[in-house]
Amino acid sequence: MNKTPWYMSAYFYQIYPRSFMDGNGDGYGDFIGITQKLDYLKSLGIDCIWIQPIYPSPMADDGYDISDFENVDPRFGTLDEFKQLIDAVHEHGMKIIMDLVLNHCSDQHPWFQAARKDRNSKYRDYFVWSDTDQKYLETRIIFTDTQKSNWTWDEVAGQYFWHRFYPQQPDLNYDNPEVREKMKNVMRNWMKLGIDGFRADAVPYLFERDGMNNENLPETHNYLKECRKLMDEEFPGSILLCEANMWPKEVRPYFADGDEFQLGFHFPLMPRIFMSLGKQNASSLVKILKDTPEIPQDCQWCTFLRNHDELTLEMVTEEDRQWMWSFYAPDPEMRKNLGIRRRLWPLLDNDPKKVALAYSMMLTMPGSPVFYYGDEIGMGDDIRLYDRNGVRTLMQWDDTKNGGFSPADKTCMPVIDDPVYGYKKINVAAQEKDPESHLNMIRSLMLTRKASDALCRGKFEWLVTDDENVPVLAYIRESEYDKVWVIQNMTDSDQDFIMDLPEGKYYDLNHPDYEISGGTGITVKLAPRAFYWLRKK
Ligand code: GLC
């Protein structure tokens, strides 16, 4: 019998290490702090932690600008403490993956420092240089708010260097075999320490070619396949999760024949969850799912509601982008690049019904969900903070100083302290005690989904017939042992949903005392924003 790999129906939890928990009292989140909170993550049913960059970094892009690929930033602790965290995660029966940033390093990395100073240094060719900034002009700019070009002039080098993100993040030159090999060794070293795999950052951009848009090039796929081969051969059972903010048809090749990535984020689905809730019509979501190609067996999509970046609107039409901005980011300060720098709860009006519905959608659609720290308790954002920092504030553990994050007088990030989302009101400790809290509501949905074989790994079948008008989003999930009918009211009004249900009595997994009888053309009555996950008794 074919055993389903663990990651096919796993819960991932994204930790931004600076803000999660300060274990040594210096005001900066660290490994000791995360280790202290593993029981909490276990209680949410988390299978795998994704820890964001922990490498030494000048923090021009919050750790995604790496100045040493082989070490941890001392602000997070020591390598020994990281090892202890890995071991503790495993003792809790969970797994841990970390960010692997292949595309670029920091301009402070010794490779770049050597490269810029000496044209004859072997490190010069570790980067992509040009005498003109008129090369590769077909390549789009990603950080549209701040960057005018993917080239920056370097005085010391006397040439332009190529970068897809901030100028403090020069792209590595993957045409150089030594770079390719060095980055494989980076993977090996961290795997040897005991982690379970990587979330591979910004993978579409590794190679550049004249006349191309320089995304998803065949050369890039070939290298990524080599990386997967290395992982399979030397670290069997490890996983690679792909960050490619692309259309489903473009992400599909990252799964290749099951020999590139096991997991890939489904970027276009995420804004359409918000669009469906805002427009009270899930049409765009139905269309994108229908447009999502099949992927190889033992490969899986990762679904998510929010993450540490702006809510990206790169994968929607111009018209939908304008709609999303006007609806969800009326204040221009809320916008960032082609996206929205706000957290889940403020986006959904701090309305538990809307948030529960958003989770219902994520938890019942195919994919392994990735949860962003703090969303489970209803944390807010602070749009006054620079760049994307507003969604990276301190985790709110309790109502003591700094939300229980740290006893220090000065912390690396501010804590939210407003009357609605502030730590005195919104925190883990208070919500643990309250059966009606956001935390208990979301945890309950998470645990219910986890107990359903159909919701975790079942086949997917539409109950929606009209793609344009979808006030009720409905589908079936079915596995060998389990079948669940999911019916969700996107709207603020009562809805009657007419459907065929085989004869018998049904209950709602989330409210077992709800009962409905099957039959042909029966009417399911849904209150505003209500949802049912129905199973036969
Ligand atoms: C990814 C990260 C983002 C970072 C960028 C450059 O998109 O999610 O936070 O800025 O890569 O490394």
Image: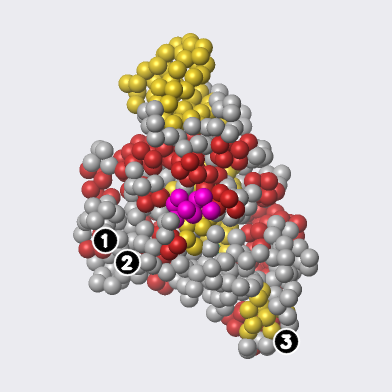
Placement of the N terminus among the 4 image quadrants: top right
Mark 2 residue element = loop
Q: Is residue 221 left or right of residue 523?
A: right
Residue 514: x percent and y percent? 35, 21
Q: CA distance from mark 2 to mark 3?
A: 45 Å
Q: Is residue 167 left or right of residue 129?
A: left
| Figure label count | 3
Residue 461: x percent and y percent? 58, 27
Q: CA distance from mark 2 to mark 1?
A: 9 Å
Query: Residue 166 sits in which quadrant?
Result: bottom right
Magenta residue check for 504: no
Q: Earlier in the sequence, mark 3 or mark 1?
A: 3
- Most common secondary structure along the magenta stretch: helix
Residue at the farthest right position: 211
Residue 414 numbered mark, or none = 2
The reply to whether callout 3 and callout 1 are in contact (CB within 8 Å) is no
Query: Residue 151 sits in which quadrant?
Result: bottom right
What's the residue at 22%, 43% (across, down)? Answer: 433
Tell me the residue that label 1 is attached to: 417
* Above or below, comparing residue 207 to residue 226 in the picture: below
Say which amino acid is labelled 2.
Pro
Tell me the residue that label 3 is attached to: 120
What's the residue at 58%, 80% (across, down)? Answer: 110
Residue 327 numbered mark, or none = none
Q: Which residues are magenta?
A: 322-329
Within 10 angstroms of label 1, few (less than 14), some, or many (20 or more) residues? some
Say which amino acid is labelled 3.
Asn
What's the residue at 55%, 52% (across, down)? Answer: 321
